Image (cartoon, grey):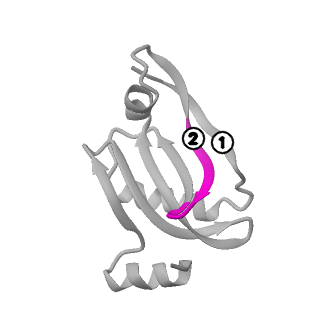
């Protein structure tokens, strides 16, 4: 499916993204369109609270001092992978929209991990 076809399918359902999974308001897996290296594509996104990411995904029980992040991964059949960690108490639809806007506005996004913002404690 092309990014244009994907957008049409989402808009027909009244959304700007396709929700794939939502786990306890701490993690969301969804797809949306955007640009990467000036080409249109579908992003296969995982959005996490920082606490969930470091306790469940990284599987560490030690307290951490961490920063928010965007990590751009490989291109897969379902889209280019992107992992986003935000310092939020929970993931809701507003956080999903904010993450999509952030990724779409980041003009020089390349593969790899970007950390930003103040360092915070998570445990």
Q: Tell me whether the residue at label 1 lies in contact with that at label 2, contact meaning CB atoms closer than 8 angstroms.
A: yes
Q: Main secondary structure of the magenta part?
A: strand
Q: Position of residue 34 (x, y in %)?
A: 58, 69
Image vertical order of residue 40 relative to residue 28, above or below? below
Nearer-the-camera pick, 14 or 95: 14
* Left or right: where 45 falls relative to 35: left
Q: Which residue is mark 1?
A: 114
Q: Residue at x 41, y 69 (%)?
A: 17
Please identify the residue farthest to the left as the structure is shown.
Answer: 24
- Rendered image: mark on residue 7: none
Instruction: Give the secondary structure at mark 2.
Output: strand
Residue count near mark 2 (Cα–Cα under 10 Å), binned few <14, some 14–19, many ≥20: some
Is 19 situated above or below 50?
A: below
Q: Which residues are magenta?
A: 68-79
Q: Earlier in the sequence, mark 1 or mark 2?
A: 2
Residue underneath mark 2: 69
Left or right: residue 88 versus residue 105 is: left
Residue at (50, 61) in percent of width and height: 100
Magenta includes 72?
yes
Label 1 and label 2: CA atoms lie apart by: 5 Å
């Amino acid at each position: 499916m092309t990014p244009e076809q994907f957008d049409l399918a989402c808009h027909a359902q009244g959304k700007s993204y396709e929700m794939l999974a939502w786990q306890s308001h701490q993690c969301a897996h969804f797809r949306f369109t955007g640009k990467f290296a000036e080409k249109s594509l579908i992003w296969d996104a995982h959005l996490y609270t920082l606490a969930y990411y470091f306790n469940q995904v990284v599987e560490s029980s030690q307290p951490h001092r961490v920063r928010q992040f965007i990590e751009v991964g490989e291109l897969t059949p379902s889209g280019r992978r992107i992992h986003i960690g935000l310092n939020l108490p929970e993931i809701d639809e507003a956080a999903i929209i904010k993450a999509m806007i952030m990724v779409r506005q980041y003009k020089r996004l390349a593969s790899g991990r970007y950390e930003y913002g103040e360092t915070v404690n998570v445990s």
